[in-house]
Image (cartoon, rainbow, N blue to C red):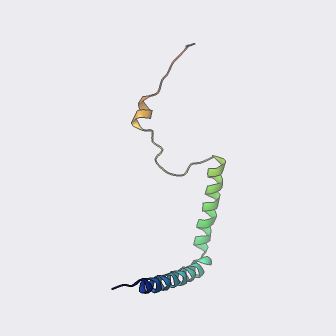
Amino acid sequence: MYTQENLFKMEKELIKELEKTIDTLDKKFSKDKLVEKFEKSTSEFEILVEKGLIKKRGNNILSILDKNSTNISFNTI
């Protein structure tokens, strides 16, 4: 049976292991040229999104309601 004390110890151990793993992977990939290229392209992409030149991917298709609700009118006052 788990006591609150045991759960707290387990949580601390898990946090330590996660931090250790993150540090290890960070060191491993920090000098990787391919990762540097991806990070550079991501930052350039974000700049273009902020400028409004491009959009992030997603569902850009018009909904059925929006697609069929276009009103075209000529010479109306």
Image coordinates of residue 52 in percent, x first then y, are 63, 46
Relative to 67, is 58 above or below?
A: below
Q: Is residue 12 left or right of residue 30?
A: left
Image coordinates of residue 19 in percent, x first then y, are 54, 81
Q: Nearer the viewer, residue 47 or 9?
A: 9
Relative to 13, is 67 above or below?
A: above
Q: Nearer the viewer, residue 32 or 51?
A: 51
The residue at the far front in this view is 4
Q: Nearer the viewer, residue 27 or 37?
A: 27
Image coordinates of residue 67 in percent, x first then y, are 43, 33
Q: Quadrant of the C terminus?
A: top right
Q: Is residue 44 left or right of residue 63?
A: right
Q: Quadrant of the N terminus?
A: bottom left
Image coordinates of residue 60 in percent, x first then y, are 48, 44
Relative to 56, is 31 above or below?
A: below
Q: Is residue 36 left or right of residue 62?
A: right
Task: Please report the residue visible at 44 percent of the width from the left and 86 percent of the height from the top.
Answer: 5
The residue at the far left in this view is 1
Quadrant of residue 75 in the image? Answer: top right
The mark total stands at: 0
Task: Please report the residue visible at 64 percent of the width from the left and 61 percent of the height from the top.
Answer: 43
Task: Please report the residue visible at 46 percent of the width from the left and 47 percent of the height from the top.
Answer: 59
Q: Is residue 67 left or right of residue 29?
A: left
Relative to 69, is 27 above or below?
A: below
